[in-house]
Amino acid sequence: MTIAIFLGSLLGAMALGVPIAFALLACGAALMWHMNMFDPQILAQNTLEGANSFPLLAVPFFMLAGEIMNTGGLSRRIVKLAMALVGHVRGGLGYVAIIAAALMSALSGSAVADAAALAALLLPMMVKAGYDRERSAGLLASAAVMGPIIPPSIGFVVFGVAANVSISKLFIAGIFPGILLGASLWVTWWWMVRRQGPSDITPPRAGMAEVLAALKDATFALGLPLIVVVGLKFGVFTPTEAAVVAAVYALAVSMFIYRELKVSHLYPLFLSAAQTTAVVMFLVAAAMVSAWMITVANLPAEVVKLLQPLLDSPRLLMFAIMVLTMVVGTAMDMTPTILILTPVLMPLVKAAGIDPVYFGVIFMINNSIGLITPPVGTILSTVAGVGKISMDEVTRGVWPFMVAQFAVMFLMVLFPQLVTVPARWFY
């Protein structure tokens, strides 16, 4: 009965068009009413406590770093470097997009920020060079999926807080899986180019002097992920402090070295980062009400009892959880999916003896791919809006890349060592 009330109130509120944060509050209130313990003070207290978290301070700073990256010239220099390296090969702009997305993922931690930058910089170039517009938009959208996986990652911060898992370990464990996702896109793009053959205009091969010049120009942009990863690895700073370092570094490089960011640009940047942060933080605060009620109602124990037969087979349990997350991801954005499912699934994961860090990485990959699954697909709408093309075109173009990324995810479910072994190298 408790599970029915939890799902019924949440899905019912969402079906009525209630914003997800308010639907979560309504769900928590419905559970309180069912258990005869309704108290507005508890609602208010848990809402405030939900946002009162030191690790969550990383969210606004990573958001700000992403905004500065796109405005201050860091993204453009990374694209220019990738162009110098692989722009001359057949289908080269596609490979440029994959390399640029991987490098930009290590700067912003936000899939939407990466998608907006990639679509603004590369989609017009790809269309002008004769690439199929649908396929190009689909590649750019799927490449942005690496954003929440390759550290730093806002998604890992939210999951780490919700699941009480080390954010530093999540960051480090996400490096190799993020590279594998990029490799799947590379192979898929290579196969499509070989099979269909783009009628693209291939630029001449860049000389060594041009490559070195592009590398020199992008050196400070490439320094940011290096500083963050090395700092976390050797305990120089926490993930929250890493977010501050990323924002300050990006601001200093954009204003004083590249000199593309002016003082007049700062207010709109801070405002945009604050608005996005407010949405995320309100979601987290509202979710904590539901999470507290889920614990009080002993809902995780009911779920564990329901799925008891799967506890003896961790891989089968992971398959079931991933399928559930895929279905939820088609209807909900990444942050609410994390906040709603994590309190329910974590006791199940621990009961089955699954490594929480490994689960967090796979769970985050699934949620990230959910950003390109229609009909909600936040990245799809971002690419469509920035690239000035229809949502249907982006959706048609993204399918082969999305299938490749899901294949890699299920490969990691079959072979957990693909995540756990490289993570131990970096720990």
Image: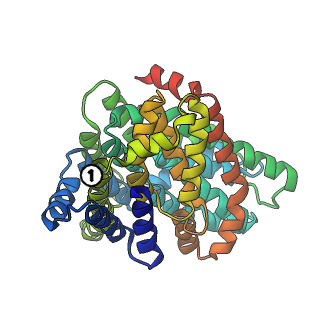
In the rendered image, residue 73, in percent from the top left (x then y), is placed at 42, 57
Viewer-side residue, 305 vs 267: 305
Viewer-side residue, 328 vs 173: 328
Viewer-side residue, 116 vs 375: 375
Q: Amino acid at mark 1?
A: Trp
Q: Residues within 10 Å of mark 1 (few under 14, many from 20)?
A: some
In the rendered image, residue 325, in percent from the top left (x then y), is placed at 54, 51
Residue at the image position 28 percent from the left and 54 percent from the top: 293
The answer to whether residue 145 shows anywhere in this view is no
Q: What secondary structure is marked by label 1?
A: helix
Q: Which residue is mark 1?
A: 292
The answer to whether residue 118 shows anywhere in this view is yes
Viewer-side residue, 154 vs 125: 154
Occupied quadrant, residue 347: top left
Residue at the image position 19 percent from the left and 63 percent from the top: 43
Residue at the image position 38 percent from the left and 33 percent from the top: 229
